[in-house]
C-alpha cells in the first residue's frame, strides 16, 4: 500500500493550522548571541523556491 504525499508551499502555511506537510532544504544556518539568549537561525527553501527564515530561541 502506498500513500501519496502532498507537500504545501511555504507561502501557504498559516499559524492557526497544525496539519501541514512541507519539504524544505536548508540553504544556510548560523548561531547568534543576542541579549535575549542564544539563537539558531536557518534559511529554508521549498521546491517552489520560496524562502523562509526559521529562528529557534534558547533563552
Image: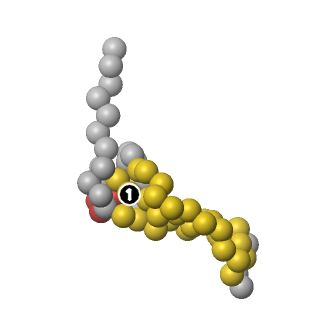
Q: Secondary structure at mark 1?
A: strand
- Residue at 36%, 64% in the rendered image: 51
- Given the current orientation, which residue lies at the most extreme top position? 1
Front position in the image: 52 or 1: 52
Compared with residue 57, is residue 26 higher up or lower down, i.e. above or below?
above
Report the coloring of the rendering: secondary structure
Figure disc tally:
1
Q: Badge 1 local density, few (<14 within 10 Å), some, or many (20+)?
A: some
Q: Residue furthest front?
A: 28
Q: Dot 1 corresponds to which residue? A: 45
Q: Name the image quarter holding the C terminus.
A: bottom right
Q: Residue 30 occupies which quadrant of the picture?
A: bottom right
Q: Is residue 36 left or right of residue 51?
A: right
| Nearest the eye: 52 or 16 | 52
Residue at 38% over, 48% down: 22
Kindly indicate the quadrant of the structure image that contains residue 1. top left
Nearest to the observer: residue 27 or residue 34:
27
In the depicted structure, whether residue 45 falls above or below residue 31:
above
Residue 55 percent across, percent down from the top left: 55, 68
User: Where does the image place residue 32, in percent across and percent down from the top left?
Assistant: 66, 74
Residue 6 place in picture, x, y as percent: 29, 39
- State whether residue 58 appears in this view: yes
Residue 41 position within the rendered picture, expressed as x and y whole percent measured from the top left: 57, 67
Residue appearing at x 43%, y 51% in the figure: 25
Residue 16 showing in the rendered view: no
- Residue at point 70%, 68% (across, down): 58
Residue at far bottom of view: 35
Closer to us: 13 or 35? 35
Q: Is residue 31 left or right of residue 6?
A: right
In the image, residue 39 above or below residue 36 = above
Amino acid at each position: 500500500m502506498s500513500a501519496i504525499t502532498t507537500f504545501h508551499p511555504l507561502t501557504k502555511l498559516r499559524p492557526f493550522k497544525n496539519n501541514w506537510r512541507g519539504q524544505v532544504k536548508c540553504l544556510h544556518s548560523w548561531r547568534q548571541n543576542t541579549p535575549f539568549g542564544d539563537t539558531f537561525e536557518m534559511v529554508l527553501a521549498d521546491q517552489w523556491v520560496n524562502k523562509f527564515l526559521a529562528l529557534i530561541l534558547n533563552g
